[in-house]
Amino acid sequence: MSTQEELRQLEEDLAKLKASNADLRSQVSDMGATDAVERAAMLGMADEQDGLIAELEARRDELRSRLDSP
């Protein structure tokens, strides 16, 4: 896979993950006063996704840098 193809795929995956994370956080907000354990689990999943998003963004920046250098 070329760097350009990898970057394109990574950007698609990143967009999907960000949308999923926003949806998950929205669900938690809409839950109101419900089971605290379930809310905590969902927030934990969202936080894990935030970490993955940060890793993917760092990889994206690395790929962009590689493409910009001669």
Image (cartoon, rainbow, N blue to C red):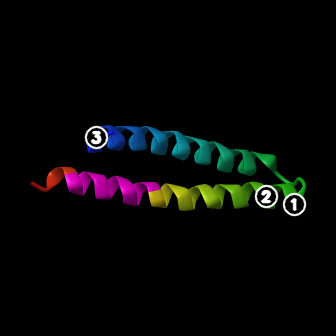
Where is residue 10 drawn, in percent x and y?
41, 44
Mark 1 neighbour density, 10 Å: few (under 14) some (14–19) many (20 or more): few
Front-most of residues 28 and 62: 62
Mark-to-mark CA distance, 1 and 2: 6 Å
- Residue extent of the magenta highlight: 56-66
Q: Main secondary structure of the magenta part?
A: helix
Q: Which residue is mark 2?
A: 41
Q: Compared with residue 19, is residue 48 higher up or lower down, i.e. above or below?
A: below
Quick one: quadrant of the N terminus? top left
Q: Residue at position x 86%, y 54% from top? A: 33
Position of residue 69 in the picture relative to residue 58 (left or right): left
Nearer to us of marks 1 and 3 is 3
Q: Callout 1, which amino acid?
A: Val
Q: Compared with residue 49, is residue 3 higher up or lower down, i.e. above or below?
A: above
Q: In what element is the residue under mark 3?
A: loop
Position of residue 31 in the picture relative to residue 46 (left or right): right
Q: Residue at position x 71%, y 61% from top? A: 44
The picture quadrant where one finds residue 36 is bottom right
Q: In what element is the residue under mark 1?
A: helix
Where is residue 26 drawn, in percent x and y?
67, 46
Q: Which residue is mark 1?
A: 37
Q: Are marks 1 and 2 in contact (CB under 8 Å)?
A: yes
Q: Are marks 1 and 3 in contact (CB under 8 Å)?
A: no
Q: In the rendering, which numbered label is found on residue 61?
A: none
Where is residue 55 drawn, in percent x and y?
47, 60
Mark-to-mark CA distance, 1 and 3: 44 Å
Q: Callout 3, which amino acid?
A: Ser
Q: Callout 2, which amino acid?
A: Ala
Residue 62 forms part of the magenta stretch: yes
Quick one: quadrant of the C terminus? bottom left
